[in-house]
Image (cartoon, rainbow, N blue to C red):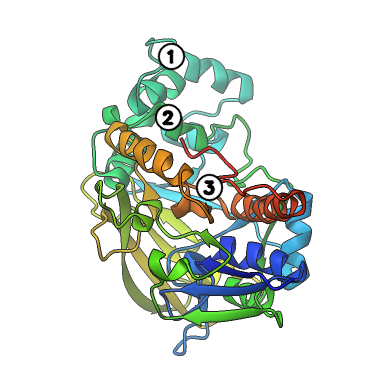
Amino acid sequence: MGEHILMVGAGLSGAVAGRALAEAGYRVTVADARPHVAGNCHTERCPETGVMVHVYGPHIFHTDDAEVWDYVNRFETFMPYRHQVRTTVGGRVHAMPINLLTINQFFGRAMRPQEARAFIADQAEAGPEDPRNFEEQALRLMGRALYEAFFRGYTEKQWGCAATDLPAAILSRLPMRFNYDDNYFFHRFQGMPNGGYTAMVERILDHPDIALDLGRTVTPAEAGAHDHVFWSGPLDAWFGHDAGRLGYRTLDFERFTATGDWQGCAVMNWPDADVPHTRITEHKHFAPWETHTESVLYREYSRACGPDDIPYYPIRLAQEKALLAEYVARARAEAGVTFMGRLGTYRYLDMDVTIREALDTARAFLAARAQGSAMPAFTVNPL
């Protein structure tokens, strides 16, 4: 075929799309500024404890997409894993997401499901039918007591601004349940890779027509030497941030070790406003099929992302959306480059959605080449 494709980014987007194109006969170079593959889902064994550590914070695989589930199991054995989160509020531990146990414990009651529904309906505050912000949405859903205890402090620490400045849609990721199910996710396929995510991505990239170029930042000028570029780096970086930087939140991690089981669960949230960290993660609990006498934990702190920080969560408030629209318009006028992934499209994406979009993007490219048509800058709408 002869065409040489450049994938900028060796995370899930670049690896999955790169593998699909290599299997279709293209020569592919996958480049990344970091010295390892797998992006933010990079995992590695702690040499002191043997614990598999999620270096950039925990990643739990969950999906209803059967094709994506089959795809990841092609490259790694996924072990059963049930994600459970706890939260310490005012010195007491509760289950998350909010469920019937949380409600009964918090209010000191013993309500059945229908009683709890009616109780929460009485707690809810009247407000606009179309809530304008996170706080209005929360008060309408659950009332002030649960909102103030479990959500306000955590959310404002996570995003660095008042809850009234955040969009209501953020709360849609946090369901409330009126039974005792404390499984964090509803998806039918859930699990953790036995050997870690990095081993999985290394296998995806293990193809004779894929070359790796790690530990070096690739510039758009260099990208022009290839027949097509798939850019999963920051969208604004393609343009040298010349119109300004898209806003992100980043995370700082305070690592510590302990003997035995330190907190009894994988994730403990800390929503109290006077506690500076948002949560503590204990990584051996992400691999419950393993046994370790020592433990590795991280306190997580959220803050504004600077130019040299790792971007985690796109802010997407009014100012960022206006700047995003400008960059998207410019990107659509570019030739020979397609933007993908969470950074390339400036969207929060779960891993399964990232893989789905990478597969679809590669298929769209192959279809465009077969038809002799141009590949668009985006296969999804980032706006």
Which residue, given by chain and number where applicable, does mark 1 sit on?
A: 130
Tag 3: amino acid: Ala
Q: Position of residue 198 (x, y in %)?
A: 57, 75
Q: Which of marks 2 and 3 is in front?
A: 3
What's the residue at 26%, 66% (across, down)?
308
From the viewer's perspective, is the residue at label 1 or at label 3 nearer?
3
Residue 226 percent coordinates (x, y): 54, 69
Mark 3, secondary structure of its residue:
loop
From the viewer's side, name the closer residue of 78 and 271.
78
- Mark 2 and mark 1: Cα distance apart in space: 28 Å
Amino acid found under the numbered disc labelled 1: Asp
Give the spatial CA distance, label 1 vs label 3.
Answer: 33 Å
Relative image position of residue 170 (x, y in whole percent): 43, 35
Task: Identify which amino acid the numbered label 2 is placed on.
Answer: Phe
Residue placed most toward the observer, 207 or 178? 207
Instruction: Determine whether 191 is above or below 248 in the image.
Output: below
Outermost residue to the bottom: 47
Q: Could you tell me which residue is drawn at 51 percent across and 66 percent down?
A: 41
Q: Is mark 2 on a helix, strand or loop?
A: helix
Task: Check disc 3 and report the residue beneath it.
Answer: 377
Give the image quarter of residue 151: top left
Q: Is 292 situated left or right of 323 in this image?
A: right
- Disc 1 or 3, which lies upstream in sequence? 1
Residue 216 x, y percent position in the rendering: 40, 79
Viewer-nearest residue: 144 or 106: 144
Q: Which residue is drawn at 58% across and 19% down?
A: 115
Q: Residue furthest front?
A: 372
Q: Is mark 1 on a helix, strand or loop?
A: loop
Q: Name the residue under label 2.
A: 107
